[in-house]
Image: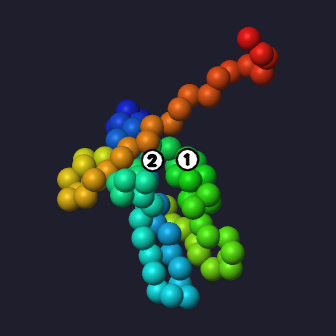
Amino acid sequence: MKNMRKNFNSDVVYIVRIVNPHINEDYLLKNAISEVVAFKDRDDAIAAARLRIRKRFFVEYFEIYQYPLWMVKEWRMPIQIRYRVPKEKGGGNA
């Protein structure tokens, strides 16, 4: 049972939706060339969403959606999948 769960989690991506309730507007997080950005790591998705929210009036919020990778690849819009970059271990200057 654990192997099945591990495989399911490895085939999942996270999509960010940013919502502005005051003007009834919402949109998916996109990159500079209008591709929807899908993240393999939930923490990376949250960090990117926090950077994108317009902080001037503090009216926007974000939602994170979890989708199977096969479903996202079937969408009829361009998708960019961002994989987590491994961080270097150790704190010394080498």
Q: Quadrant of residue 82?
A: top left
> Residue furthest toward the right?
92
> Which quadrant, please, contains the N terminus?
top left
Element carrying mark 2: strand
Q: Are marks 1 and 2 in contact (CB under 8 Å)?
A: yes
Q: Is residue 92 above or below residue 69?
A: above
Foreground residue among 77 and 17: 77
Residue 44 disc label:
1
Residue underneath mark 2: 39
Q: Residues within 10 Å of mark 2 (few under 14, many from 20)?
A: many
Q: Is residue 63 visible?
A: yes
Q: Is residue 46 visible?
A: no
Residue at the image point whose x is 63% and y is 80% from the top: 59
Q: Is residue 43 above or below residue 10?
A: below
Q: Position of residue 93 (x, y in %)?
A: 77, 16
| Amino acid beneath label 2 | Phe
| Amino acid beneath label 1 | Asp
Q: Position of residue 84 (x, y in %)?
A: 50, 36
